[in-house]
Image (cartoon, rainbow, N blue to C red):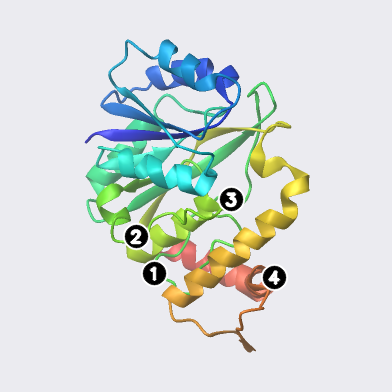
């Protein structure tokens, strides 16, 4: 199985050397690296091309104009040749056996469409701090599952063949695009949880998802993503609340999923699954 490592890149060459070394150390070596540059403004693209020029596994593409993360990640998948795909941000890293364990899951269970693992939160130097507490096994096939508690996160991998059965990553999203992918893959088949921290997530000021000034944008994207998910699943009512165009879906779903009874039921069902 060819594994396509997908990289949405923008002004991140300062971290790329470490990222590249990390990938080269993988115990599973049948991979390609797909990089889509979103019109970097710091000469990153030229540096990337020069640094990887002698590695035929690295394929670099460029957006004609700055398009944003949703468009860029969608293009990453489109350019991939691998049967299995997975995003790694250029400022993050994965364990040496991350690809191997993911591929093993597909070989052990050919019917699954994706995998996800625990995630290790790290400081700005990528030194491990703690395992993200919310990552856990979820119940497959539940039309009311929206990943509102971030149970599904990195390291997420997926079958491209199954991805093509979805509408694909929403190119208009400027945040929460990963969660859009998770929900769409969840809708087309079963996901397998790998209970090990395979992904090292760097917490630093340059992280887009960590920028407090973008909270409003993230909330808007979340609501748009959830609204589209409800339309795909023909969900018009959650609990006793009838949904409208102006419904604050993230608030409605979060409150419903975090009652004491809901938490207990979720743990019991996941344990028995």
Q: Which residue in the protein does label 3 denote?
A: 174
Q: Are marks 4 and 3 in contact (CB under 8 Å)?
A: no
Question: What residue is drawn where x is 71% and y is 31%?
Answer: 204
Q: Is residue 104 visible?
A: yes
Rendered image: mark on residue 141: 1
Mark 1 / mark 2, whichever is N-terminal = 1
Check the picture and name the quadrant holding the N terminus. top left
> What element does badge 2 sit on?
loop
Mark 1 / mark 3, whichever is N-terminal = 1
Mark 4 / mark 3, whichever is N-terminal = 3
Total numbered labels: 4
Q: CA distance from mark 1 to mark 3?
A: 28 Å
Rendered image: mark on residue 190: 2
Q: CA distance from mark 4 to mark 2?
A: 26 Å
Quarter of the image where one finds residue 40: top right
Question: What residue is drawn where x is 33% and y is 31%?
Answer: 100
Q: Nearer the viewer, residue 12 or 30?
A: 12
Mark 3 / mark 2, whichever is N-terminal = 3
Q: Is 226 left, or right, of 80 in this rendering? A: right
Q: Residues within 10 Å of mark 2 (few under 14, many from 20)?
A: some
Q: Are marks 1 and 3 in contact (CB under 8 Å)?
A: no
Q: Is residue 155 above or below residue 11?
A: below
Mark 4 / mark 1, whichever is N-terminal = 1
Q: Which residue in the protein does label 4 denote?
A: 251
Q: Is 204 left, or right, of 169 in this rendering? A: right
> What element does badge 4 sit on?
helix
Which is in the foreground here, disc 1 or disc 3? 3
Question: What residue is drawn where x is 23% and y is 43%?
Answer: 107
> What element does badge 3 sit on?
loop
């Amino acid at each position: 199985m060819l594994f396509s490592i997908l990289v949405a890149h923008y002004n991140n060459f300062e971290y790329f050397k470490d990222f590249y070394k990390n990938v080269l150390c993988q115990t599973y070596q049948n991979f390609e690296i797909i990089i889509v540059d979103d019109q970097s403004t710091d000469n990153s693209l030229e540096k990337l091309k020069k640094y990887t020029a002698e590695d035929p596994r690295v394929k670099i593409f460029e957006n004609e104009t700055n398009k944003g993360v949703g468009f860029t990640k969608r293009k990453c998948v489109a350019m991939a040749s691998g049967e299995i795909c997975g995003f790694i941000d250029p400022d993050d890293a994965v364990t040496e056996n991350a690809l191997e364990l993911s591929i093993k899951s597909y070989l052990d269970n050919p019917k699954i469409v994706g995998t996800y693992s625990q995630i290790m939160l790290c400081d700005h130097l990528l030194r491990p701090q703690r395992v993200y507490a919310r990552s856990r096994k979820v119940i497959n096939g539940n039309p009311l599952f929206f990943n509102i508690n971030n149970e599904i996160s990195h390291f997420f991998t997926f079958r491209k063949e199954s991805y093509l059965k979805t509408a694909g990553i929403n190119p208009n999203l400027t945040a929460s695009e990963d969660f859009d992918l998770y929900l769409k893959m969840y809708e087309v088949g079963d996901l397998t949880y790998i209970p090990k921290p395979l992904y090292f997530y760097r917490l630093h000021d340059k992280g887009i998802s960590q920028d407090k000034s973008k909270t409003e944008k993230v909330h808007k994207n979340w609501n748009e993503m959830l609204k589209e998910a409800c339309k795909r699943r023909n969900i018009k009512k959650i609990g006793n609340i009838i949904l409208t165009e102006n419904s604050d879906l993230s608030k409605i779903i979060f409150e419903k999923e975090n009652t004491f009874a809901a938490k207990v039921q979720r743990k019991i069902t996941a344990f028995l699954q």
